[in-house]
Image: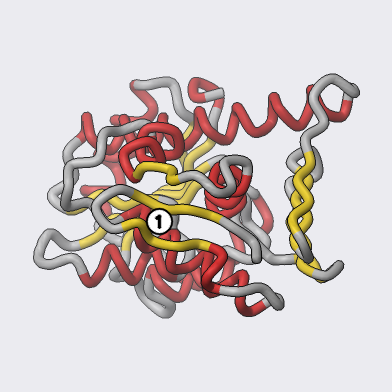
Amino acid sequence: MESEATVLIVEDDPALASALSELLETEGFNTQIESNGENAISRIRDENPDAVLLDLGLPDSDGFEVCKAVRPDYMGAIIMLTGSHGDNDHIRGLEVGADDYVTKPVSPPLLLARLKALLRRIEQISEVTDLSVAGGDSKKLNMGPLFIDRRARQATISDTLVELTTFEFDLLWMLARRSGTTVRRDELYRQLLDREYDGLDRTIDVHISRLRKKLVEFGGDADWIKTVHGKGYQFFVT
């Protein structure tokens, strides 16, 4: 999928946008460039690219607003391009629905690694779904009011559909299928982000917080996901 994937680069710095496009095209990606936030919202909805590289500082709508606007319906990967000072920007980006982030100045190897990791996960999702539709690997979990259908990639609480991003669904599935046991933080990083946990990265923590809020919003309980300090997370529906 990676060599055929389309990436929309949303960046208002022409030099950086051109450099990113050249980097990705060299790796076999198809790229498009958009410099305006409002236009980016329309293009993501209409063109449905495989991935979006989303800068924060944009005319009209900033990167946070763009991400928040498209995330309910867009299932592709979103990587935020954030400033290098402090972690507030990338945490806020994750909270509004970005899958991952890369700080500026952009490291080409790091950007490529994170983009390819997210696209591989999405490709695996497609393969699992196709196999399940064919009748080979239908997986479902039912725990109290929570029902998860991996084939349909849907979760419901008391028959109410929980609106989850692709990342949030994968995180929920990984925790729920190991219900009652501790899933280590470093395992979540390897499985969902294809990188090692360095002890400082808060990406998974922010996604966990967002998932808890979604569960509560749709009738569940934040205590379904418990933090096991120094280790990871445990999922259990009471």
Q: Where is residue 36, by image quadrant? A: bottom left
Q: Position of residue 75 (x, y in %)?
A: 62, 51
42 w.r.t. 200: above or below: below
Q: How many numbered badges does the structure rendering display?
A: 1
For label 1, the crowd category at 10 Å Cα-Cα, with few meaning under 14, some 14 to 19 and many 20 or more, is many
Please state if 35 lies on the left or on the right of 124 as rendered. Answer: left
- Front in this rendered view, residue 65 or 170: 170
Residue located 71% across and 66% down the image? 162
74 and 215: which is toward the camera: 215
Q: Is residue 39 visible?
A: no
**Residue 43 x/y as whole percent:** 59, 58
**Badge 1 is on which residue?**
10
Q: Quadrant of residue 168?
A: bottom right
Q: Position of residue 81 (x, y in %)?
A: 28, 55
- As drawn, the residue found furthest toward the left would be 85
Looking at numbered disc 1 in the image, what kind of residue is underneath it?
A: Val
The residue at 45%/70% (across/down) is: 96
- At 55% across and 49% down in the image, what residue appears? 180
Reply above or below: 159 against 17: below
Label 1, secondary structure: give it. Answer: strand
- Residue 173 visible here: yes
The image quadrant of residue 191 is: top left
Looking at the image, residue 166 sits to the left or right of residue 188; the answer is right
Q: Please, is residue 45 above or below residue 134 in the view?
A: below
Q: Quadrant of the C terminus?
A: bottom right
Q: Residue at x 28, y 63 (%)?
A: 90
What x and y, as percent, mark residue 42?
Answer: 61, 65
The quadrant of the image that shows the N terminus is: top right
Task: Work out whether 116 lies above or below 99.
Answer: above
